[in-house]
Image (tube, rainbow, N blue to C red):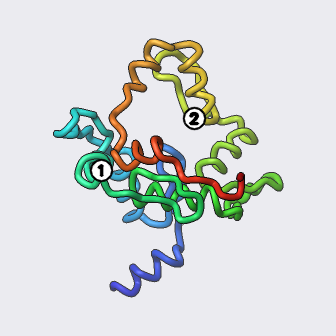
Amino acid sequence: MYLTRHLERHYPTKQVICESCGKVIHSLDALKHHMRRVHDKVSEQCTYCGQWYSSRATMRRHLLNMHVHADEEHRCEICGFVSSSKTAKKRHIEFKHNPEKKHKCTMCDKAFKTPTLLKEHIATHTGVDLYNCAYCDASFKSKSNRSTHYKRHHPAEYMANMRRRPCPSSINNYIQNPPVNLEAQ
C-alpha cells in the first residue's frame, strides 16, 4: 500500500485540477495539501510587533527571521549582500548569481529564473490576469504592474500598506558598512 502511494506520487496515473486557481496537481492528497497551504489560510498575528500574516507558517517564518534570529548575519559569500534569513540568502544567490533560467515557456523561446516570472509571462500569451487591485476593478498579469498601479492610483492605501518594520541589526550594519569592492578601485 505504501509503495503504491509512493509510486503514484512520482508516476501519477491521473491528475487533479484545483478549482480555485487551476493548478494541475498529481493526486488528491497533494490537492488537499495544496488547498491547506495556498487557499485555506487563517490569519495569524505576530505577538512581538502585531503584524498580521496570511498563515501560521508565514507568521512563524517572520517571527524566527525578524525577532528570534534577527541578529544572525546571512551574508552572501559572492558579493557580501546581507539577507534577513538563510532562505532569503539562498534565493538571493539563486536569483542574482546563477545565470541559468530553467523555467522555459512552452509558447515561445523565453526562459525565466523563477516559476512566478514564467507564470506571469505565460499570462501575456493567454491574456489571463493573475492579480487584482484590492481597491478598484483593475487586474494585472504581474505583481509589479499591480504595485505600480497602487502607487499611482491609490497612494494613501499604498503608503499605509508599506508601513516599514525595523530591519534586523545585521542588515542595518550592512547598510552602514557596505563591503568594499576591490575590483572597482
The front one of 10 and 84 is 84
Point out the frontmost of discs 2 and 1: 1
Number of numbered callouts drawn = 2
Give yes or no for contact between labels 2 and 1 (Cβ–Cβ under 8 Å). no
Q: Residue at x 70, y 44 (%)?
A: 121
Give the class, few, some or many, for how many residues have Cα within 10 Å of label 1's Cα (few <14, many ≥20).
Answer: some
Q: Residue at x 33, y 52 (%)?
A: 36
Q: Residue at x 63, y 29 (%)?
A: 145
Q: Residue at x 41, y 84 (%)?
A: 4
Question: Residue 161's image quarter?
Answer: top left
Checking the image for residue 83, the label placed there is none
Q: Is residue 48 visible?
A: yes
Question: Residue 163's image quarter?
Answer: top left
The front one of 183 and 156 is 183
Checking the image for residue 143, the label placed there is 2
Q: Is residue 112 left or right of residue 131?
A: right
Q: Is residue 32 visible?
A: no
Residue 155: image location, x then y, percent: 50, 14
> Secondary structure under badge 1?
loop
Q: Give the residue number, with chain letter if any, for mark 1.
A: 70
Give the class, few, some or many, for how many residues have Cα within 10 Å of label 2's Cα (few <14, many ≥20).
Answer: some
Give the vertical position of 145 relative to 55 (above or below). above
Q: Cα distance, mark 2 to mark 1?
A: 27 Å
- Of all residues shown, which one is farthest toward the right? 109
Give the vertical position of 43 relative to 110 (above or below). above
Give the vertical position of 44 relative to 11 (above or below). above
Residue type, label 2? Lys
> Secondary structure under badge 2?
helix
